[in-house]
Image (cartoon, grey):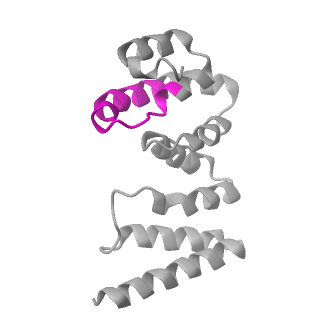
Amino acid sequence: MVPDRLYRLRRHAEDYLRACLETSDYVLAEKLEKEKEASPYHTSGSIDCRVPLVRVYQERGNTEQLRVLAKEFLLHDRLSYYPIQKERYDQKEWETVVDCLLDELQARAGAKHAFFNRQSPYPEALKAEGKQERLLTYVQKNPLLIQSY
């Protein structure tokens, strides 16, 4: 397919998706997003293309899918999805989920952020949850963060 034609098709699909969201046709919007992800022309590896699904799941009240998607965003360094993730659980349930989530964030923080010199959402999540012991341990292992935390 000619690159220019492919670009125009993508733009048209984005406009159609935007129209579905504006008219609250969330079923069709979700279907379009899923089809786009399944397309051989879809750029895998980019989580940003899944942002419209967050709105779809929020508007449809699809808590389980929103939990999965928000966690995916968190694990791809999108800290802004932390409150969305937390809001989808009641307090008691969150207490059991948060430690596993923090463990996953910690594993990712150690594996790639030191290499790429990127800011991990892990220390911010620890700060938000009041986990000072874990935060202190993390900062001790990453002395460049001392001024930040």
Q: Give the x, y percent position of residue 11.
A: 49, 82
Residue at horizontal 47 percent and vertical 63 percent from the top: 49
Residue at horizontal 50 percent and vertical 25 percent from the top: 123
Residue extending farthest to the right is 23
Residue in the foreground of this view, choosing between 141 and 132: 141
Q: Is residue 145 magenta?
A: no
Residue at horizontal 33 percent and vertical 27 percent from the top: 110
* Quadrant of the snapshot with the C terminus: top right
Dominant secondary-structure state across the stretch colored magenta: helix
Question: Magenta segment, which residues?
Answer: 100-123
- Residue 97 shows up from this direction: no
Q: Where is residue 104, by image quadrant?
A: top left
Q: Where is residue 83, by image quadrant?
A: top right
Residue 14 falls left or right of residue 139: right
Q: Is residue 107 magenta?
A: yes
Vertical comparison of 126 with 4: above or below: above
Vertical comparison of 137 with 1: above or below: above
Q: Where is residue 41, by image quadrant?
A: bottom left
Q: Give the x, y percent position of residue 38.
A: 36, 69
* Quadrant of the snapshot with the N terminus: bottom left
Q: Give the x, y percent position of residue 134.
A: 48, 13
Residue 6 falls left or right of residue 66: left
Residue at horizontal 39 percent and vertical 17 percent from the top: 143
Residue in the foreground of this view, choosing between 13 and 109: 109
Q: Give the x, y percent position of residue 95.
A: 60, 21
